[in-house]
Image (tube, helix red, strand yellow):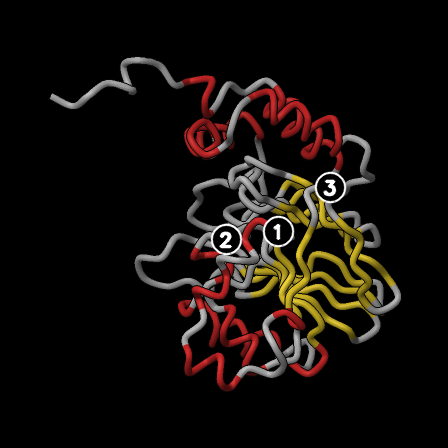
Amino acid sequence: MFERTTSQVLFDNGTHKCISFTSLVKGEGVQANQFLIIDHERAAVLDPGGDLTYVPLTMELNKYTKLKNLDYVMASHQDPDIITSMPRWLVYTDAKIVASKLWARFLPHLNSSFMSDRMKGSWEERLIELPDQGQRIPLGNSVLVAIPAHFLHSVGNFQFYDPVAKILFSGDMGASMVDDANLPIENFSDHIPKMKGFHQRYMGSNSIIRLWVKMVRQLDLEMIVPQHGTAFIGKEQVNQFLDWIENLQCGIDLMNDRIFSVPL
């Protein structure tokens, strides 16, 4: 089903498309996936990354759409591999930046005065601040849904649900450390060691995870697609992941006085 390519079409019904880009980061950068959603020619980019990915990503985007059709650049959270390319998108496109209201005051720090002078429109006009409860965002003839995922791992964290494709773009939730993100998961048990350590350290606590799982089970899902590593494809894999993560102890659950001690 999957071949090692730069882009992978996750969904296409003729008017609505979802494309992932898995191999744009070269060298020492952490492997990261970027995503393009198109509905009736209007487009959104999810978690576009930083300078490592901006040029190769825009080259790939041009194969599927025109940059003038880009309505949104969406950021699940504030990490460098998520949104540090923001100034370029503000200068070279008319897209609006979608991010948590918690990070709105910090994102301008990514912008140089040179970029600010060249930016199309004011910063305030170009930013959509997401409230903690999330928000529905129109795209073409459809909507994307910003789903709360706070403390998984960022204090202001969102995932993006596409109800047409039935895909949850889950940010760091479900991330895995793999050699080839395009290779499908053949055995879920074998995949757990590629996720476990990361989730134990980066996710806030099991109580937060349980709230998230309860919410996500209400969605009609065919895929959970994280920002790092391999996607969970089909309801069986989606449920396998939710069953596993629901019971994982992580974050503050694992902290103790051995870690919180003054180094000698």
Q: Quadrant of the C terminus?
A: top left
Element at label 1: strand
Task: Identify the disc placed on residue 226.
Answer: none
Q: Which mark is residue 133?
A: 3
Mark 1 near mark 2, Cβ–Cβ under 8 Å? yes
Do labels 3 and 1 touch, CB within 8 Å?
no
Percent x, y of residue 161? 74, 48
Q: CA distance from mark 1 to mark 2?
A: 9 Å
Identify residue type, mark 3. Answer: Gln
**Does label 3 or label 2 sit earlier along the sequence?**
2
Determine the CA span between mark 3 and mark 2. Answer: 18 Å
Q: Nearer the viewer, residue 240 or 205?
A: 205
Residue at the farthest top position: 257
How crowded pointer 2 is (Cα within 10 Å; few <14, some 14-19, many 20+) is rated as many
**Disc nearer the start of the sequence (1/2):** 2
Residue 67, how many percent across, how many down? 65, 80
Q: Secondary structure at mark 2?
A: loop
Amino acid under label 1? Answer: Ser
Question: Disc 3 and disc 1: Cα gap in Å?
Answer: 10 Å
Residue depicted at x 43% and y 42%? 177
What residue is shown with label 1? Answer: 100
Q: Nearer the viewer, residue 84 or 43?
A: 84
Which residue is under mark 2? 78
Residue drawn at 51 percent across, 50 percent down: 181
Q: For the residue marked with disc 2, what is the amino acid?
A: Gln
Q: Closer to the camera, 155 or 49?
A: 155
Q: Residues within 10 Å of mark 3 (few under 14, many from 20)?
A: few
Q: Earlier in the sequence, mark 3 or mark 1?
A: 1
Q: From the viewer's perspective, tell me whether residue 45 is left or right of residue 198.
A: right
